[in-house]
Image (tube, rainbow, N blue to C red):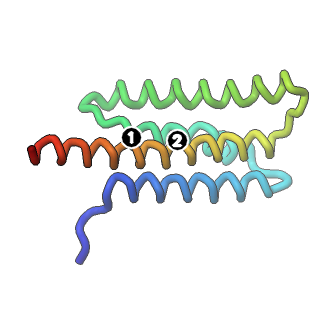
Amino acid sequence: MRGPLTFRTRCLIAAIAVLAGAGVLAAMPTAPVALVALFLLGAPVGVVALAWRTADRLARVVVAVAISLTLNGLVAEVMLAAGVWSPSAGIAVVGVAVAALAIALGHLSARELSAREEGTAR
């Protein structure tokens, strides 16, 4: 039996899940509002909570929700200012941004772990 998944693997799985969810929701002509809201708020919260390890769970949730609301607000604001508002495109942009964040966090974490191992080996 294999050991637990590495942090990098969990980040990659999260990125794939977010992209799949964004693709399904963006392709649905009439997606339920509750499902769209759950994705737009839940996907960024999940990735941030996965990445930010702290003992204080309340702080992790508060920061994750704040980042989620900020990301969604920025995407909506840029789309409105550019005159290209589209709910499907907004879902896709948030999905790609969150997936990119998950991949970047997994990559940075792998670099940090290898740097720690090199530092302790000396």
Taking the image as shown, residue 95 lies to the left or right of residue 121, namely right
Task: Using the image, determine if residue 18 lies above or below residue 4.
Answer: above
- Dot 1 lies on which element? helix
Q: Position of residue 2 (x, y in %)?
A: 25, 73
User: Are the residues tagged 2 and 1 within 8 Å (C-beta)?
Assistant: yes
Residue type beneath disc 1:
Ala
Taking the image as shown, residue 77 lies to the left or right of residue 51, namely right
Q: Which dot marks residue 98?
A: none
Of the 4 image quadrants, the one containing the N terminus is bottom left
Residue type beneath disc 2:
Leu
Tell me the residue at 33%/49% (across/down).
Answer: 110
Of the 4 image quadrants, the one containing the C terminus is top left
Q: Which dot marks residue 51?
A: 1
- Dot 2 lies on which element? helix
Tell me the residue at 39%/59% (across/down).
Answer: 9
Q: Earlier in the sequence, mark 2 or mark 1?
A: 1
Q: Which residue in the structure is indicated by mark 2? A: 101
